[in-house]
Amino acid sequence: DIQMTQSPSSLSASIGDRVTITCRASESIRSCLNWYQQEPGKAPKLLIYGASSLQSGVPSRFSGSESGTEFTLTISSLQPEDFATYYCHQSYTTPQSFGQGTKLEIK
Amino acid sequence: QVQLQESGPGLVKPSETLSLTCTVSGGSISSHYWSWVRQSPGRGLEWIGHIYYSGSTNYNPSLKSRVTISVDTSKIHFSLKVTSVTAADTAVYYCARVSVSGGWLYYFDYWGRGTLVTVSS
């Protein structure tokens, strides 16, 4: 099975900060990497698919990139509504798998 | 706007069968994959499996012997059954629509609100 390792597991930041979250796959998953945002008590929400494609309706301050088996989610300027937990998800092979999550908190 | 809604018992006894339904509105079940994902504090987010509208399925090997996903003939809902449940199956269960880009990029673009299922006697 492919393991997805996210870092950091938690992060404190301020409004306006630039934030980067990383997800590393245990083997190649090509570009089959998606990012989701989850607020407490809610379902995950799709932000980025295919490593770097912005889902319709998602603000442009969110972006994704890839380098080999390392994938990055960047929020260019944090807004109050961005404080949530973020998950990566590989859909390259069965079983599909998720990272353990990165909780983004207000500093 | 596509909406998904999970329904089913919130409490299931150990060794019994967990049964959930996901009702799809605002769009057709046709031409999409439909998936179940669960989330628990101990296991995080876990992909259970998916079904294509035509009925073909793909399951997580760790659950395959106990899981069945089906789609109803009227094509407005799909279902999940997990047999022989234990406390480890206690989780929030989500249904989700799978979209495909370029024929090979799969992602969950619509999710239900989730339903908590507790396994306890």
Image (cartoon, coloured by chain):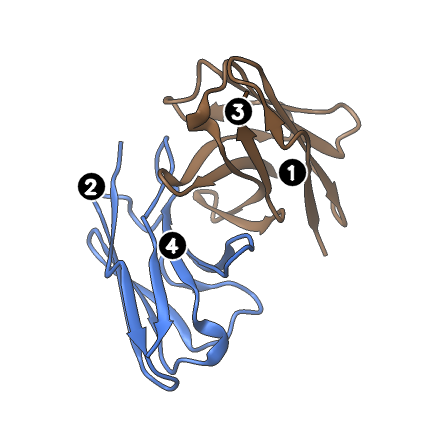
Q: Name the residue rendered at 62%, 49% in the picture.
A: B113
Task: Residue under label 3, please give it.
Answer: B120
Local crowd at mark 3 within 10 Å, few (<14), some, or many (≥20)?
A: few
CA–CA distance between discs 1 and 2? Answer: 30 Å
| Residue type beneath disc 3 | Ser
Q: Are marks 1 and 2 on the same chain?
A: no
Residue B3 horizontal side relative to residue A31, left or right: right
Q: Residue B31 shows which numbered tag?
A: 1
- Quadrant placement of the C terminus of chain A: bottom left
Upstream in sequence: badge 3 or badge 1: 1
| Residue type beneath disc 1 | Ser
| Residue type beneath disc 4 | Tyr
Which image quarter: residue A41? Answer: bottom right
Circle 2: element type:
loop
Percent x, y of residue B102: 47, 49
Circle 4: element type:
strand
Q: Name the residue rendered at 49%, 19% in the picture.
A: B85
Q: Residue furthest bottom?
A: A16
CA–CA distance between discs 4 and 2? Answer: 18 Å
**Label 1 lies in what chain?**
B
| Chain that the image shows in brown | B
Disc 1 or disc 2, which is closer to the eye?
2
Percent x, y of residue B10: 63, 33
| Chain that the image shows in blue | A
Task: Residue under label 4, please give it.
Answer: A87
Task: Residue under label 2, please give it.
Answer: A27
Q: Residue furthest right?
A: B74
CA–CA distance between discs 3 and 1? Answer: 38 Å
CA–CA distance between discs 4 and 3? Answer: 29 Å
